[in-house]
Amino acid sequence: MKIPINTKAYLRQVSISAFFWGLSLGFFAVFRYLGINRAPDIELSCNIRALILTNMATLTILGAVLGMVYASIEYFFEKSVSKSLGWRLQLFIKIMLDLLITLGLLRLSLIITQSNGTKEGWLSWLSNERIESIMLYIFFCSFFVFFLMKIAAERFGKAVFFKMLLGKYRTPKEEDRIIMFLDLKDSTTIAEQLGHFRYSQFIQDCFHDLNKLVLKYEAEIYQYVGDEVVLTWPYLKGITNNNCIGLFFNFQQRLLSRNRYYLDYFGICPKFIAGIHGGALMIAEVGFVKKQLAYHGDVINTSARIQKQCNNYNVPLLLSEKLINDLNIQDLLTSKYLGNVLLKGKSKEVKIYSLLV
């Protein structure tokens, strides 16, 4: 049975967090007891050795549980909290929630320990001054490691960040990709009407609505360029479930459903146009002061040129013949051949199509 994409994203986030926190508290236990047998006046019996191993295993399990809880809070917090809530308030609420849950789980550990009637039971050292050390360690892991990794993942995109972290694109790699250039229609007129400050807010809101759909359709954001955004998919992901066109049409629907909001605040209903093409291109890390991934190849240029034809044909979406042939749209949409077009910078004509709902 196919797991819905939101569920897959949630389970992936929970798994990574559980692994990270299990490993972190497991290391804490190792560091805590490392070299204890060499300390003066301490002689380890078999029972003490078994207790130490039990504590290490228990801390690892506790870390995994904390990781699952933290990831669940993060996931559902991002899904439910209003965008208008300032980042400082969001951060404060998250810290308080994490702190309360951590203390609750530690307290539960003590209750279980005491219920067993063993003062030397697992995690019993948390009932004394040692609780400060583990709380400080959790704080460090959370805000100097996990939190910074989260910022980096959001800066580059989660999929891109981990690929860069593993050094996948230190040397150029060829991949089959789908590229979508998505641009605001009549952007110059809208910018003059709104002024630069309100226009910037307008673009922010539009891209916020777009970001709500990115994970659902397994897209990656390559870059934002003014009022344009470039999205990409690994080729198979893009054509699976018609993800690449599904994102566009659902983005249109989302903007229509929020027409009242845009009219009330800006007096304008945003409309976007898009051009999509796919094929082989090169991906490489570029830059040193500001490192990022760069896509090189004819696919990028052709996608951009196809998008520029939307105004000429007065249609919101144009695709190349290659994508039309690979997408499974026969029972959902009707494709319309618009002709062979000699795109700017190209020596050969390209067949382009529009889609009719």
Image (cartoon, rainbow, N blue to C red):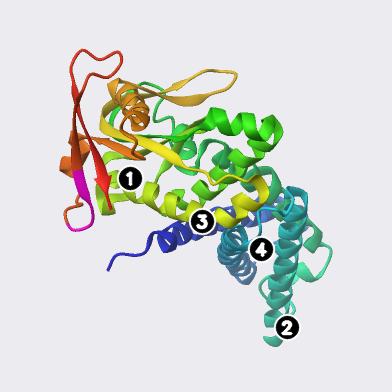
Whole-number angstrom distance, CA of label 2 to CA of label 3: 28 Å
37 vs 306, nearest the viewer: 306
Q: Amino acid at mark 2?
A: Gln
- Tell me what residue is drawn at x 57 percent, y 37 percent: 155
Give the mark toward the camera: 3 or 1: 1
Between disc 2 and disc 1, whose residue precedes? Answer: 2
Q: Quadrant of residue 73?
A: bottom right
- Secondary structure beneath label 3: helix
153 vs 221, nearest the viewer: 221
46 vs 298, nearest the viewer: 298
Q: Which residue is mark 3?
A: 19
Q: Quadrant of residue 311?
A: top left
Q: What's drawn in magenta, residue-wise?
A: 331-335
Q: How many discs appear?
A: 4
Q: Which mark is residue 114?
A: 2
Q: Which mark is residue 44?
A: 4
Q: Is residue 9 left or right of residue 300?
A: right
Task: Report if the CB atoms under discs 3 and 4 are less than 8 Å apart.
Answer: no
Q: Which residue is mark 1?
A: 244
Secondary structure mostly taken by the magenta-highlighted segment of the chain: loop
Q: Amino acid at mark 3?
A: Phe
Q: Position of residue 201 (x, y in %)?
A: 66, 40
Whole-number angstrom distance, CA of label 2 to CA of label 1: 56 Å
Between disc 3 and disc 4, whose residue precedes? Answer: 3
Between disc 1 and disc 4, whose residue precedes? Answer: 4
- Secondary structure beneath label 4: loop
Give the mark toward the camera: 3 or 4: 3
